[in-house]
Image (cartoon, rainbow, N blue to C red):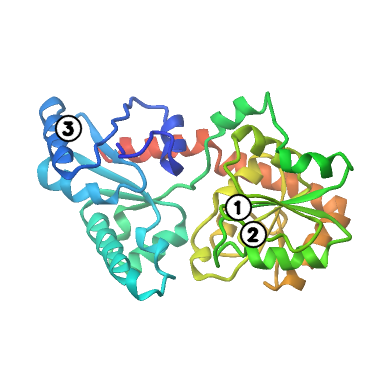
Amino acid sequence: MSTLDPNYSRSGAIFASDPGAKVFIKFPSERLKQVRKILELKRKHNPNDACIVLMSPNHILVPFFRVLSRFQVILDAGWPLSDSTQNITKRGLKPKQILNRLIDKVSFTLANQVVLESKNQIASVEERFEISGAKLFWIFTGFNELEFSKAKENPEIPAECRYEYDKGKQFVFFRGKSNSESGLDLVLSAARLLKNDVNFVLATNTTIVPGSPNVIVINRFVSIEELVWLYTHSTLVLGQISNMERLNRTLPHKLFEAAYFSKCYVSPPSPALFELLNEDSFISVSTITPVGLSESIKKGLLDEELRSQCEKNINQNYLENASQLFLGARMREIIETKK
């Protein structure tokens, strides 16, 4: 159940590949209508025969279900809501930080089971919110392969890339928001250092000045067909290039996309990253500076054998531990064993 579409975020990918009996119910956003919907479900379904899986990021619905019904409630949280505001320091947004932390605490406490994105996220939630580890489970976020598999038949080159691609140049692909966690500014600085070596294609959510002739910026919605083309034709894919503390317990969507497409991934190492990958599956950025990133990129560009090894290993790790079918089966295990 979700107030958003059934294919949204991590829960959408897991729901699509869950092999068991299931049905998606779109929840209204108004509180009174939500209460009415829960009471309607209570009348229609026996709590011994059904359980409620609340899809990310519907943490706020947990207390309503627990107070108004006897359903088993599984919250596929992925991560705490407060993670999205923990680095915001503006005075006017402080109440939002407090509210998100309160919602996290209440929803994690009242849910029968909480599903998170990594083992390190479990350890963090257990400590920060004083939640019993017995009710915490982990499933990688993954992504919806089903959508991409259809688009593979008809990849589309972004208009921004046509001119440079015709020249036959390699490119490094970065997909991410313009914030301190993604390290976009650092990527731009590294691109300037490598202006004679490789092109960069940056798909981001804001208008930025490239600052270098070897940088192509796509600051609009990118279709799945275009993403397929970008991943298929890129030589390297960049992860989140920063030392933000949250990266120790989270794995970005683009990691799973790169792994699915067997692409050499360039990223700083982290505890969460090593839950899926080993040292032979990616190129490590040991020094998170423009020089450190540029050196790691050049290493991947020049060492074809290393790059090929990373491409093979990252895809193998993905298929064994994070494919969409694998994640759906893991969710079904949690649902079935807890009834």
Which mark is on residue 208?
2
Q: Position of residue 183 (x, y in %)?
A: 62, 65
- Quarter of the rendering containing residue 52: top left
**Res. 320 image quadrant:** top right
Q: Residue at left 11%, top 34%?
A: 39
Q: Amino acid at mark 1?
A: Thr
Which quadrant of the rendered structure holds the C terminus? top left
Q: Amino acid at mark 2?
A: Ile
Q: Are marks 3 and 1 in contact (CB under 8 Å)?
A: no
Callout 2 crowding tier (Cα within 10 Å): few <14, some 14–19, many ≥20: some
Closer to the camera in the image, 65 or 163: 163
Q: From the viewer's perspective, is the residue at label 1 or at label 2 nearer?
A: 2
* 137 shown above or below 39: below
Element carrying mark 2:
loop
Sooner in the amino-acid sequence: mark 3 or mark 1: 3
The local secondary structure at tag 1 comes to: loop
Q: How many marks?
A: 3
Q: Which residue is mark 1?
A: 204
Q: Are marks 1 and 2 in contact (CB under 8 Å)?
A: yes
Q: Are marks 3 and 2 in contact (CB under 8 Å)?
A: no
